[in-house]
């Protein structure tokens, strides 16, 4: 049997002596063994519980990802539209005189990115996007990797946010869900009420729309909010 030696403060040593005197343990060594076994069992149960939520169920489902996708549906909606000469992203602006919310849309002249869902998760992804450089394929891979890592690392949970990235050069919109999978679209909506918003976009979208027409469609799809923010490339 392996032997473990440790150094403890005098105050802790006196406390352990008092526990031994109660008769529950025959020695401090026995007390330590019991405490260590209890700790290891607790850690094991935590790991098993974590694995059970991130492993495939018999039906092929990963419950933590499903929870994350639900969270991504509860954020302020964002609309993305490609038009004849560019791309436009828009979201309602809920800020008022007393409260100002963090921006959901970022643009650097080459790409536009936006998120919906848990704000902290979305802002984390946006901070990574701000540092990314390179071709579209490289950015897509790096972004997908960020989401994927949060579904596989011990102690992490899937990110509860959906993200859209528009590429000026390619005039494409990539839509990411919390699993890291993505697809391309000419128009899309993420966030609260996205299904209803998509119905409006689907019925009125045209590839040859002007910027002004795309702006009007985005406003209409979002319910004509009094205040809004948008970026266009």
Image (cartoon, rainbow, N blue to C red):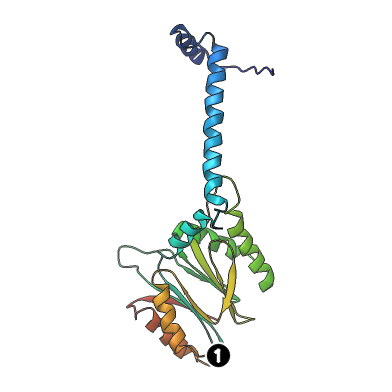
Instruction: Identify the image quadrant of the C terminus.
Output: bottom right
Residue 133 can be seen, yes or no? no
User: Looking at the picture, does residue 35 appear above or below residue 99?
Assistant: above
Q: Quadrant of residue 175?
A: bottom right
Q: Quadrant of residue 133?
A: bottom right
As rendered, which of 126 and 148 lies closer to the eye? 148
Residue 92 can be seen, yes or no? yes
Q: Residue at x 49, y 13 (%)?
A: 16
Q: Residue at x 55, y 54 (%)?
A: 58
User: Looking at the picture, does residue 63 appear above or below residue 231?
Assistant: above
Instruction: Identify the image quadrant of the N terminus.
Output: top right
Looking at the picture, how far across and down is residue 222, in whole percent?
38, 78
Looking at the picture, how far across and down is residue 15, in whole percent?
46, 13
Looking at the picture, how far across and down is residue 199, in whole percent?
42, 81
Q: Farthest residue toward the left?
A: 97
As rendered, which of 135 and 19 lies closer to the eye? 19
Residue holding disc 1: 84
Total labels: the figure holds 1
Is 6 situated left or right of 90 in this image? Answer: right
Looking at the picture, how far across and down is residue 95, in whole percent?
35, 67
As rendered, which of 50 and 173 lies closer to the eye? 50
Q: Residue at x 50, y 11 (%)?
A: 25
Q: Secondary structure at mark 1?
A: loop
User: Looking at the picture, does residue 85 appear above or below residue 193?
Assistant: below
Q: Residues within 10 Å of mark 1 (few under 14, many from 20)?
A: some
């Amino acid at each position: 049997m392996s032997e473990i030696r440790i150094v403890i403060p005098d105050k802790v040593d006196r406390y352990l002596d008092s526990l031994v005197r109660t008769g529950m343990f025959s020695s401090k060594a026995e007390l330590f063994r019991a405490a260590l076994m209890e700790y290891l069992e607790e850690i094991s149960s935590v790991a098993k519980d974590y694995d059970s939520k991130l492993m495939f169920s018999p039906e092929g489902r990963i419950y933590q990802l499903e929870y994350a996708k639900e969270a991504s549906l509860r954020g302020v909606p964002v609309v993305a539209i490609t038009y004849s000469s560019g791309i436009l992203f828009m979201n309602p602006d809920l800020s008022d005189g007393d409260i100002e919310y963090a921006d959901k849309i970022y643009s650097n002249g080459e790409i536009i990115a936006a998120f919906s869902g848990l704000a902290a998760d979305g802002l984390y992804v946006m901070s990574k996007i701000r540092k990314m450089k390179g071709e579209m394929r490289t950015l897509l891979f790096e972004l997908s990797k960020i989401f994927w890592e949060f579904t596989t690392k011990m102690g992490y949970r899937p990110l509860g946010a959906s993200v859209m990235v528009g590429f000026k050069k390619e005039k494409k919109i990539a839509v990411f869900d919390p699993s890291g999978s993505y697809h391309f679209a000419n128009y899309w909506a993420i966030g609260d009420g996205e299904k209803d918003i998509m119905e409006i976009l689907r019925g009125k979208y045209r590839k040859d729309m002007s910027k002004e027409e795309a702006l009007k469609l985005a406003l209409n799809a979002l319910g004509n909010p009094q205040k809004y923010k948008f970026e266009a490339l």
